[in-house]
Image: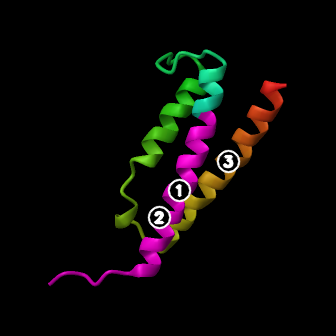
Amino acid sequence: MEKPLNYEHTFKIEILNEFSNGVYARLLNFVLKKGIDTSDNKNFYANLLEQFSEMRNMNLFKMTNEELDNVRAYWENMNNYIKGITKEKSA
């Protein structure tokens, strides 16, 4: 028997996907503008971009609401961090 679709859970995941994509895109834009090689594993920003990529590939549909809240908190913290470094470093 199939599990019924939980629309609230799905909505939470969609919002989280959009938010994480925005954070990733902001860092990618910063990295590209700075001419940083995204495959340079010795560069902090390239490594952070790789970490973001791995986080974005997690299967959120298998997570509980509590786990989704933890992922959301991670992306909110990373969003604040990226805002700080792009503002500080681009000046």
Q: Is residue 35 visible?
A: yes
Count residues near mark 1 (Cα–Cα under 10 Å), then give few for <14, some for 14-19, many for 20+. Answer: few
Residue at 48% in and 32% down: 50
Residue at 57% in and 39% down: 25
Q: Quadrant of the C terminus?
A: top right
* 72 left or right, relative to 7: right
From what the image shows, is residue 53 above or below residue 58? above
* 7 left or right, relative to 88: left
Q: Earlier in the sequence, mark 3 or mark 2?
A: 2
Residue 42 on the magenta span: no
For label 3, the residue is 79
Residue 16 position within the rendered picture, expressed as x and y whole percent measured from the top left: 53, 60
Q: Is label 1 in a helix, a strand or a loop?
A: helix
Estimate the spatial distance between the alpha carbons at disc 3 and disc 2, rounded to whole Å.
17 Å
Give amino acid for label 3.
Asn
| Residue extent of the magenta highlight | 1-27
Residue 88 position within the rendered picture, expressed as x and y whole percent measured from the top left: 82, 30
- Tell me which secondary structure the magenta stretch mostly adopts: helix
Estimate the spatial distance between the alpha carbons at disc 1 and disc 3, rounded to whole Å.
12 Å
Instruction: Please state the total of marks drawn on the protein image.
Output: 3
Give amino acid for label 2.
Glu
74 or 34: nearer the eye?
A: 34
Circle nearer the viewer, 3 or 2: 2
Count residues near mark 2 (Cα–Cα under 10 Å), then give few for <14, some for 14-19, many for 20+. Answer: few
Estimate the spatial distance between the alpha carbons at disc 2 and disc 1, rounded to whole Å.
6 Å
Q: Which mark is residue 14?
A: 2
Residue 47 position within the rendered picture, expressed as x and y whole percent measured from the top left: 53, 27
For label 1, the residue is 18
Q: Is label 3 in a helix, a strand or a loop?
A: helix
Kindly give the residue lying farthest to the left in the view shown: 1
Q: Tell me whether circle 2 and circle 1 mark residues in contact (CB < 8 Å).
A: yes
Give amino acid for label 1.
Glu
